Each structure stands twice: as structure tokens, then as C-alpha cells.
Image (cartoon, grey):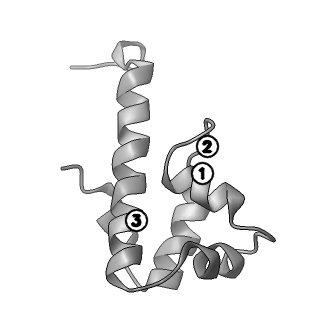
Amino acid sequence: MKIYADITNDEIQDTYKQVSNTVKEIRVSKKISQNDISFAMGFTTPTFYTNAENCKQGKHFNLEHIIKIAKYLDTPISAFFIIK
């Protein structure tokens, strides 16, 4: 059994990337722009959203973001956590 201390930072970063990639795939499949979804989430510019979706500059989505994204994309939250 793995315990918390056995989880590496790389594993955590890989999970962030997998979730972000899934968000992007679903968003693109629904033909929704990063601008549209970021403004709908309450951001004044798309910068944070773009960086989080691409895991750039140490940004990533938190649970609140995932809840908002799921609602906007009309997608179950669980869809973002299917690790490929």
C-alpha cells in the first residue's frame, strides 16, 4: 500500500497534466474557446486559465476550477479524473 509520503512531486505533476489535458480535449471537442470558458469562470483575462490548461508557470486547476469547468462544459466531474 502506498502512503502519502511515497507519492512523488513528479506523480502529482503528472496527474495535474492528465487532468488539464482532459479538460482541453473536452473543451476543444465542444468548440469552446479558452477566452469563453475563462470569462465564464469569472476571470478578467484568459491568462490563468491558459496557463493552468497547459500546466505552465506552475499553474494548475484546483477543485473549484474543475467544478466550474464541468458545469460550463456540461460534463461530469469524474470525466476529468479518468487517468489514461
The residue that appears at 32% across and 56% down in the rendered structure is 81
Numbered circle sitting on residue 51: 1
What distance separates the C-alpha of mark 1 from that of mark 2?
Answer: 6 Å
Are dots 1 and 2 in contact, CB under 8 Å? yes
Residue 58 vs residue 4, the one in the foreground: 58
Residue bearing the label numbered 2:
59
Quadrant of residue 41 within the rendered picture? bottom right
Relative side of 22 to 13, left or right: left
Amino acid type, mark 1: Asn
Residue bearing the label numbered 3:
24
Amino acid type, mark 2: Lys
The residue that appears at 42% across and 13% down in the rendered structure is 5
Up/down of 3 relative to 19, above or below: above
Q: Position of residue 25 (x, y in %)?
A: 33, 68
| Secondary structure beneath label 3 | helix
Q: Position of residue 12 (x, y in %)?
A: 42, 31
